[in-house]
Amino acid sequence: MKCEKHTWDINDTEWCWKCDELNNPGYYKVHKNSINKIEIGEHCFGAIARVDDEDICNIHDNEEWSKLADITQLKTIEYLKSIRHTLDTQDWKSILEIITSRDQWDYLDDESSHSSTCDQCGGWNNNDVYIKN
């Protein structure tokens, strides 16, 4: 079975988690919120990011590991959805910083983006505005 996109796009032969879910019903649902172990760190080759002993990014050119990384990423996003009500403003700021640094967002360099000191406390205030390009 194929997902909606791959039903009409026969030239796209890359692995798709939606197609895989159609062929393995329930697999993603069973795994989506069941995170039991998270590993975060650094080693001489770079960052360590594992969920339930699976690398969250495929650092090797291996199709099976790509599938596992996709499943791990989706499971992590689903878990994030389940705890979204516990996230504070700083958490959401970090998420938005990731989004604006990875996707096609342009910094809006006008009066809506500004940095200044606070008249009341003397602390530093800044506001960066991004627009989707």
Image (cartoon, rainbow, N blue to C red):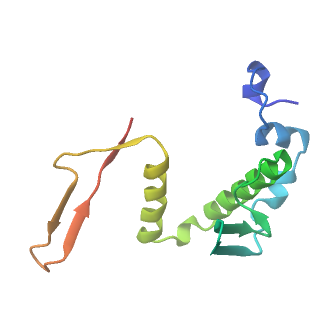
Q: State the residue lying farthest toward the left.
A: 119
The answer to whether residue 102 is left or right of residue 5 is: left
In the image, residue 82 above or below residue 2: below
- Image location of residue 133, percent across then percent down: 39, 35
In the image, residue 61 above or below residue 93: above
Total number of numbered discs in the rendering: 0
Q: Quarter-wise, where is residue 59 in the image? A: bottom right
- Image location of residue 3, percent across then percent down: 78, 31
> Residue drawn 80% across and 69% down?
53
The answer to whether residue 15 is left or right of residue 73 is: right
- Image location of residue 23, percent across then percent down: 90, 39
> Residue drawn 84% across and 59% down?
30
- Image location of residue 16, percent across then percent down: 77, 38
Q: Quarter-wise, where is residue 85 in the image? A: bottom right
**Viewer-proximal residue among 57 and 122:** 57
**Viewer-proximal residue among 87 and 42:** 42
The answer to whether residue 104 is left or right of residue 67 is: left
> Residue drawn 89% across and 45% down?
25
The answer to whether residue 131 is left or right of residue 79 is: left
> Residue drawn 71% across and 60% down?
56
Q: State the residue lying farthest toward the front.
A: 44
State which quarter of the image contains the N terminus: top right
